[in-house]
Amino acid sequence: KKPILTKEYHEILENPEIDAVIIMTGWGSHIKIAVDSLLAGKYTAIEVGGAYDISECYELVNAYEKTGAPLMMLENCCYGRKELMALNMVKQGLFGEIVHCAGGYMHYLTKGELLDRENNDINHYRLNEYLNRNCENYPTHELGPISKVLGINRGNKMLTLTSTASKACGIKEYIKENHPDSKYVNADFKQGDIVVTNIKCANGELITLTLDTTLPRPYYSRAFTVRGTKGGYFEERRVVYFEGMEDELKFNEEEFFEKYDHPLHEEYSKLGSRGGHSGMDWLVCRAFVESVKRGIQTPIDAYDTAAWMAVTPLSEQSIAMGGTPVPVPDFTKGRWSHREPIAEGKYCLDKICVDK
C-alpha cells in the first residue's frame, strides 16, 4: 500500500555514485521504476514479465531515447545452454533458412506457487493476474531466445499476433478440492489454462508461444524448437536433427554440445558451476554488469525489452476479440531494417563475437 517509489529511492537515483539499477519487484511495478531509473540516466535492468498496456512499452522506449541510458531485460533463458547452442548453429547456417520457432512456459504453478503457502489467503502476487487477466502473461522465456535467433529488431520484426485461450478451470478445481475454505473458492478466474499465441514476422517466419501453468503436468518445459530447411533443434526430445539422419534418437544434444556449444557456455564450464538455473542467471547478470563497467550497449536492449513485454497486452486484446490478429508496434520506428547487430562485448547475442 506504500508508494511504489519512495523519497529515499529518488535520492538514490540522484546519487552520481550509482551507475545502475536492477529491478526485481513484482510485475506491477517494473515499468514505473524502470522509467524513473532511465530518466535519471542510470543503466537499468528489469526482471521478466509482460506489460499491462502498450503505452507502458512506449514509455520505456521514450525514456531510453531521451537519455540514452541502456535498458536490459534480464531474460535469463537467452543464456540457456540449449538456446545458445541453437543460436550458434543458426548463425553458422547449419539449419538452413529458418521457418518456424516455438516455445513456451510450461510450468505447473497452481500447486506450491500460486497457492499452498503458509496462509492460503496471502499468496503469490501472480494470483491477482490470474484472477483479472486473460493473456499470454509470461511470454519472454522463449520469445527472448527466439527473437535473437530470428534477428527481431535487427533485420526482422514481429508484424501481427493472434492469441487464443482455453477456458479457465485448473485453479478453480484445485481450490475446491484442496482449499474449500479459501476466500478464492468461488472466485471467477479469468486466465485461460492454455494460451497459444502465433506471431508472424516480416521475413516470413512464424513464432508459436504456449502458456501452460494451471493444469497438472509431469515436468517443466520451455519446449524450445527451431525449424529450418536443413534441420532443427527439438528441446522436448533433446535432439538436433539434420535431413538425412537415419535415426534422430541416436543424435542427442549432448553430442552436439561437444561440437556446437556456444563460446559463452564453453567458458562457463571452465569457470565451474555458479548461479541458478544451470548458470544462465549468472550469465545474464554478468552480461549486464560488464556492459555497465565498459560503458557499452547491453546485449538485450530497450527495443527488445519493449517488444517482448508488448506481447502480453496484445495477446489480451486478441483473445478478447476471439483471436483476431492485432498489429505488433515497431518500437524502432523503422530502424529495424538496418540496425546493425550489437557487436561490442563478449556477451552479445546478435552474432558470435566472444572476446578471447
Image (cartoon, rainbow, N blue to C red):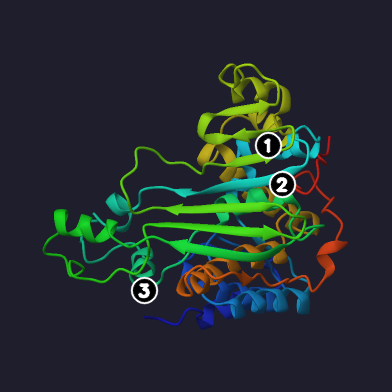
Give SS at disc 3: helix
> Toward which corner of the image does residue 11 lie, by quadrant?
bottom right
Give the crowd class for mark 2: few <14, some 14-19, many >=20 residues within 10 Å. Answer: many
Marked residue nearer the N-terminal end (2 or 1) = 1
Q: Check disc 1 and report the residue beneath it.
A: 86
Of residues 353 and 325, which is closer to you in this image? 325
Q: Check disc 3 and report the residue beneath it.
A: 132
Q: Position of residue 102 (x, y in %)?
A: 58, 47
Can residue 118 be spotted in the picture? no
- Residue 254 in the figure: left or right of residue 341: left
Q: Position of residue 41 (x, y in %)?
A: 72, 74
Q: Position of residue 169 (x, y in %)?
A: 28, 59
Q: Check disc 2 and report the residue beneath it.
A: 149
Give SS at disc 1: helix
> Toward which corner of the image does residue 9 lie, by quadrant?
bottom right
Q: Quarter of the image containing the C terminus?
A: top right
